[in-house]
Structure formats: structure tokens, C-alpha cells
Amino acid sequence: MNESPKKKDGLKYLLVGLLIILLFYAYKKNDDYVKLENAFVEEKLALQQELDEIINDYKDLSVKKKELSKRLIKEVNKIIALRDSVKNLKTNNFKLIRKYRRQVATLERQNRILFNKVDSLNILNKELEDAKKAVTNELNLQDSITKQLAAKNDSLLKYAQELQAKINYAGALKVENIDVTAMKERSSGRLTTTSRSNRTDAFKVNFKLPKNEFTVPGEKTIYVQIHDIEKKVVAPEDITTLKNGLEIEYSDEIKANYENNELNVVSLILVNRDLIKNGEYIVNVFVDGVFSGNSSIKLR
């Protein structure tokens, strides 16, 4: 028995409807899959980007402490390995993506702790560097001041030495009006002047210590030295050392009390007339170990 046309049409419409439903369902499933795949890709890229940023943050850190620097390198290598794992992920495994997301969250917490430690260390290092610079600057300043003071002291010492030299020069007594006379002894014992060498029994030396307010007053030691034409000291009494270190023989030593005023001094030096020869005799006078003047006398 043949089916009626109405039944055939109804079956055809039913099949068409089912086909449409199947096509719609298939389209819907494909669209959901595409959305899911896009979300997976976006999440994967986001994870990679976060990991790249973390890596860059690590690379930007500057740490001088050796142990902490080694730890940073270890952490960077760990993050790079995680980033490569995410990059090489081929399947749409959201479970694995969530696992990596949890690892990134853990890393970010660790990073905050580690970065805070690095920041604290860098701040401390900066403070230490600033303190070191301050100490260095202070030491340099003190060194500069010390050098300036040393230079000033040298200058003052030099000035003091020059001033002392001037005072010493000004205070040095230069004898004036040295007068040398040859004397002969008469039978009565009285001494009279002579110009003949073979009659000379003594030399009388008169001189003056001038007024000098720069000289230290008090007892002055005066040495009178007479030497002949052969540079031999006449009637040597003893040897003394001058202030310049030179040793000399002298013919007479006199102690005079000098009070910064003019003072006349007389020296009488007895000689053996048999030893006195013709010629010029030089008389040198030394006051307080310093040469103070000279004069001469000629005998025939």
C-alpha cells in the first residue's frame, strides 16, 4: 500500500528540520571551539608576556652582593624555562594553562619579596657609598687643610728664621775704633809706645763696643787674636771654637759686662820681643764667638 503524499511531505520536512538543527549545532560547536582556541592562545600569549616582563625586571636589577646575584641568576633561568614551556605548549590544555598561571602567581609573590630585599640592599649600598664619599671628602678636606697648615707653618718658620737672622745680625756687636799700639817696657817697668819690632814687649789694643739695643745684655766674652806676617798667632793663650764651628787660637780673653750702652775695652798682650819681627801684624776681635772687627799695625 503506497504512502499518501502528505506523509511523504511530512517526513521530508522532518528530515530537513533535523538537518538544519544538526548544521546549527555543528556550527555552534565549531564557533565555541574557535572561541575556546582563541581564548587559549590569548591566555598563552598573556602568560608569555608576563614571564617576559618578569625576566626583564630581573635583568634590570643591579646587585653587587655575590650570593644574592647568584640567586637572581637561578631565578631568571627558572622563569625562562617556564616561559619556554608555555611557548611550546601545543594543545588546548586549559588545565596546564591554569597550572602555569598558578606558578606565575607564585613567582610574582616571590619576586616582590626578592625585589624588596634587593631594593633594601641597594638603598643600603647607596647609603654606604654616600657615607664613603662623605668620609673621603672629609679626609681630602682635612688633608688639604693639613697641607695648607704645613705650608703656612713652613712659611712662618722661614719667616721666623729670616727674622731671627735679622735680629742676630742686628744684635751682633761690631767693635769700633780698634787702635793697636806696640809698647816697650822701660827699666822702671813703665810701658811706652814704640814702632820698632825688636823693642816691642807688648801690644795694647783699644776698641769700643757700640750701643746696640738688639743685643742681649750681660757678660760678653771677647777674644783678641794677633798674628804675624806668617799667619802665626802671637803669644797664643788657648784655643776656642767659634759659633761657625771654626777653632782658633787667641792671644787674650776678656770678660766684659755689656748693658747695651757704649763700652770701652782695653787688652794688653805681653810678648817676647825676641820673637817679634818686622812687618805687619793683624789684630782680630771676636765677641761671643763671632768675628766683630779687625785692625793692623806695622813694625820696623
Image (tube, rainbow, N blue to C red):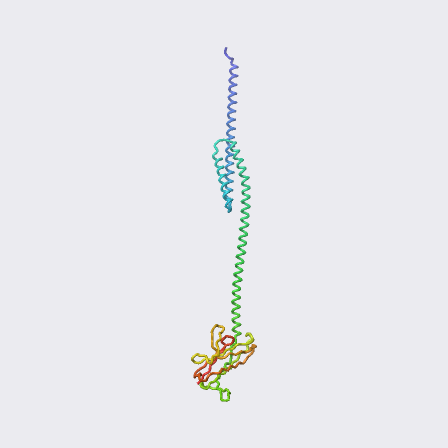
Of 228 and 95, nearer the camera is 228
Compared with 131, 171 (above or below) is: below
Compared with 186, 11 (above or below) is: above
Of 203 and 239, nearer the camera is 239
Q: Quadrant of the C terminus?
A: bottom left
Of 41 and 24, nearer the camera is 41
Instruction: Give the total number of marks visible in the rendering.
Output: 0
Residue that extends furthest to the top in the rendered view of this protein: 1
Of 22 and 221, nearer the camera is 221
Q: Percent x, y for residue 113?
A: 55, 42
Residue that extends furthest to the bottom in the rendered view of this protein: 187
Q: Percent x, y for residue 5?
A: 51, 14
Q: Percent x, y for residue 219?
A: 55, 76
Q: Percent x, y for residue 74?
A: 49, 41
